[in-house]
Amino acid sequence: SLLRLDGPALGSEYDFFTVGRDDGGDEETLLSISSKGVLEARAGIVSHGTTTLSNLDVMGRTSFKRHTVRAGDVIEINDVSSLSFLEIINDGAPSANRIIFTSPPQDQQILLIKNSDADPLTGLFKTRDIDDGEKGEVIPPNTLLLFLYNP
């Protein structure tokens, strides 16, 4: 360990680590780690990959970054595994709106797909490698669906 913090014996609760701000007499805690192992951040935590080894309780809102693509006869989506919210926006013309993923989604990936076009989306769950000409799943116009991929 480069840094190790040891506290008093079990039984008392305290903060191992606290980062705060003093705005002219009003102290505000921005980040703390408690003796019970709770990490608390006032503004939020940015992570580029998080694994939860126990239950995950979301007590506030969850935000998904929206990726928009214009409707068309063929809509090719590159690297769908990097997306959490895909919106197909209206192109103002009748379109087949056949979605093709160039690579499959990740196992257990959550993906919101919103069809903001006037025509239904087709071809979901197809990849370029297994395009069998069938219509595939359909998302009607002005509809938002949540998918959990579980192969």
Image (cartoon, rainbow, N blue to C red):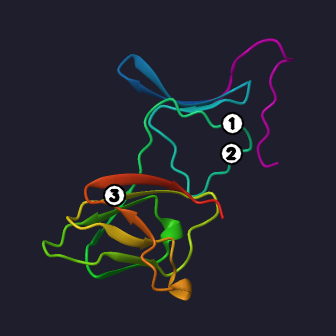
Disc 2: which residue = 52
Q: Between marks 1 and 3, how big is the CA–CA gap?
A: 28 Å
Quadrant where the image shows the C terminus: bottom right
Dominant SS of magenta comes to loop
- Element type at marker 1? loop
Residue 55, labelled with which disc? Answer: 1
Q: Earlier in the sequence, mark 2 or mark 3?
A: 2
- Looking at this view, name the residue that lies furthest to the top: 11
The amino acid beneath tag 2 is Thr
Q: Earlier in the sequence, mark 1 or mark 3?
A: 1
Residue 77 appears at what percent x and percent y? 42, 76
Residue 37 appears at what percent x and percent y? 72, 30
Residue at (53, 68) in percent of width and height: 81
Residue 106, labelled with which disc? Answer: none
Pick the residue in front: 20 or 34.
34
Pick the residue in front: 130 or 149.
130
- Looking at this view, name the residue that lies furthest to the left: 92
Magenta region, residue range: 1-17
The reply to whether callout 1 and callout 2 are in contact (CB within 8 Å) is yes
Q: Is residue 126 left or right of residue 114?
A: right
The amino acid beneath tag 1 is Asn
**Can you tell which of label 1 and label 3 is closer to the viewer?**
3
